Each structure stands twice: as C-alpha cells, then as structure tokens.
Image: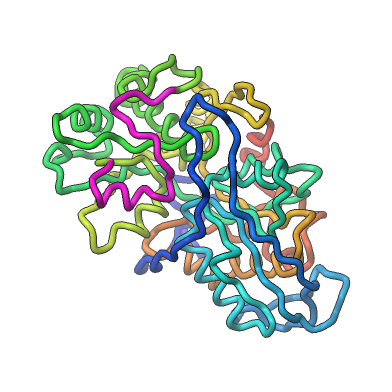
Amino acid sequence: MWESATSMTSDVPTPAASSPPSPSTPATLPPKPAAGTSTAVWIVIVIVVAAAVGGVGFYAGYEYRGSPASSTSQSQNETLSILGAGTLGAFFPPLASDLANETPGVSAPAATQTYEGSLDITTAITTLDAKTDVAALADYRLAPQLLYPTYANYEVVFGATPEVLLYNSSISAYSGINTQNWGSQLATAVSTPGVAPLGVWNASTDPNGYNEIFSMMLQGMLYDNGNVSAVYGHFYNGAAGGYAIPNTLCRLEHESQAALLLKTGVVSAVITYRSYAVANMPGTTLKMVPFNPIVGLSANNTTALSDYGMISTKVIGSSGSLVTKTPAPILFAVVVPLNAPNAALGAAFVALLISPQGQAVLSAGGAFTPIYPAWTDNPKAVPSVLAPDVVPMPAWASNLLSP
C-alpha cells in the first residue's frame, strides 16, 4: 500500500502527508556535560512495578493478538513507562495516551516518559539500572551493540527520518539557502556579526550529535570536490575522523530544546531530524532545508553505503575511552527490555506503534517514513503480539550492525 521513497530504496515506504501532531511536553533530564568533559550522565527514571498485561482484546483500536505474558488475568493498575529519543517526544505521548484511554487499568502519564539522547538511554539502562517498558533509540545499531544480550534480545525498526537544516528564516543571512549551498551559507551566516551560532548536540550522548557531523562531512564530499572538511572544518576543531570539538561558531545544547533555542534567538540554526523540524515549524518563522539523500543519511543504495564507509568520528564511550562512530541510514528502533516492569504492556505499545494508527501519527506532515512490515534482527525472539507485523531485517541493514 506504500510507494517507495525517493530518498531510500524500496525497503522503506513513503508516508502519506497530513498535518503534524501537536508536540507533547516530554519529561526532561538534568544538564549533560559539555563535549570533552566528564562522561557521567544522569537521567530521571520513574520505575513502576505492575502486574503483567493479559486478556485484553484490543489496544487503541488495533487488534491485540495475544499477550506475551504467561498470565491471562485482566490488566489492573498498570503504568506504561517509556524512554525515547528526543524527537519522539512529539509522537509517542499521543500513542501512549491512546493505549491508556482504550485499555482498562492502564495509564501512561508524562511523568513515566522521558525523551532525550539515545546514548543517555542505553547508559541509564546498563549503568543506572533504569527499568522501562519501552526503549526507543534514534540509531538502530545501538541496541544490538550496547543492550544485547543482557538487557534485550530483539529490536523492531519502525521508521526513518533524515537530517535537515532547521533555521530561523527571519535572519536575512539565511536568504537563498538551499540543498546545494547550505554548508557554505551556514558558515557565512553564523560568522556574521549579530547572528546567533549553530546549535549542536553532544555526540557522546546523542546520535544526532554524530549524525550532524556526518552530514557536514558528506556535504563537503558531494559538493566541495570530495573535501570532507569543507563544511565540518568551519564548526569543529579536530581532524575529520577524530574527536570533534565544537568551536566558537557553535553552541553545545540539548537537542530536545532546539525549537525553543531557535525561537528565542539563542541559536540561529540546527541540524536535526526532519521529524523534529516538522513537529516544531508550524506557526513559527522556522524553515527547513532538505539535504541530498546521502547527506541526510536516508539513502541506502550502493553509492550511499560506499560514501558512508569513507568517513567516521570519535565519541566518548561509556567506559570513558574514545569510540569510533561511522554513518548509517537513520533508522529508529524500539526494544522491550528483558527487565521491563511490564513487558507485555511494552509489547502492546510497540504493536500500536507499527499498526496503521501508529503509522499515521509517525507519518503526519512527512515527519517519519514508517516501515511496515517493521524489521527485526531476531524473529525468533519477537513476542506473538508483534510477529504478524515484522519481517527479518534487510541484509544491507543487518550488515551495518557490527561496531
């Protein structure tokens, strides 16, 4: 029922266009360290202990084909908890509310949902013993690399969204900016007296932090005679492929605050996910510049994968040592952790997420390209409620799971 997207191969479907959902206010985290400082991270976790879900026929209008839980008792006083990537704070809360409103005995308050950097999420689970029913990450490679086998044994890849430039169009220095010239014009704009810097994110805690670095490198590769430093070198100290330190043309901030920072003039532009841009542009002077599919990390053809293999950057890993990161198409994935307080409820939320109802929320305004059937790396581990709606991950995607 879906046509192939122009920026991806036929593995990924194209969403229908509609109005974007209204962003919900997510739970927030305390401030993170600046790049190059301590790698300790803190996260607000609400741990809810509840009985297993069972005996419920429908979740939010979507058939619930049977609980993964062993119990068949009626659900009672269960609270859904979610840790999700920052951009999902505009999309997951409405779905969580639908699940709660249409399922007796289930609640999904904002206090049990936190939306922030995906590497913060994996650290919270593995180091801070955070318990959550759903963990949704902005890089599908993170769960297999950081959560398996102790904390998860399968993931469901549910959507794609590329990088774009989101900028304040009231600033004259950005007039005429487009897909081809955004790198050079961005550098000129933030160097102009009175123009606020570029907002960037901590690559050691947020995949968007390293993805924006890759977009800069790829823009130089494609539009500046193969020079991966042509754009990157304007904004980061440190050679391409090494540890990237934002310079004075940048302001290191939290991605979840990007829209507020843009609207208040703290920064003049950010490189962020199209999903975040779509959710935050209506009614503002914010506009976005779409990137070349390779630059935006949405392409998965042979040329794109070859280009991705030519570049890298380094981030601070959980052990405090430097870890090499390489590009991959931006694919969002969700897991139900093995220690989830309400594993069956988490699986029910994932079932809703990949259902037509969930796809409609994700694809509104072109925010995400939903993937249906969703992909999984371990079909044998997927609970029965999800099995009819998932297929094995394509070979090109599974080949990129290795560190």
Residue 59 figure quarter = bottom right
Q: Say whether residue 269 is left or right of residue 240.
A: left
- Residue drawn at x 25%, y 50% is 264
**291 part of magenta stretch:** no
- Residue drawn at x 82%, y 54% is 380
- Residue drawn at x 85%, y 79% is 72
Spot the residue most to the top: 239
Query: In the picture, which quadrant includes the C terminus?
Result: top right
Residue 352: image location, x then y, percent: 61, 70
User: How many tags in the picture?
Assistant: 0
As displayed, is residue 123 above or below residue 115?
above
Residue 312: image location, x then y, percent: 52, 23
- Residue drawn at x 35%, y 26% is 222
Residue 86: image location, x then y, percent: 49, 51
Spot the residue most to the left: 172
As displayed, is residue 232 above or below residue 284?
above
Q: Say whether residue 183 is left or right of residue 392.
A: left
Q: Say whether residue 183 is left or right of residue 103.
A: left
Residue 224 figure quarter = top left
Q: Which residues are magenta?
A: 245-266
Color scheme of the displayed model: rainbow
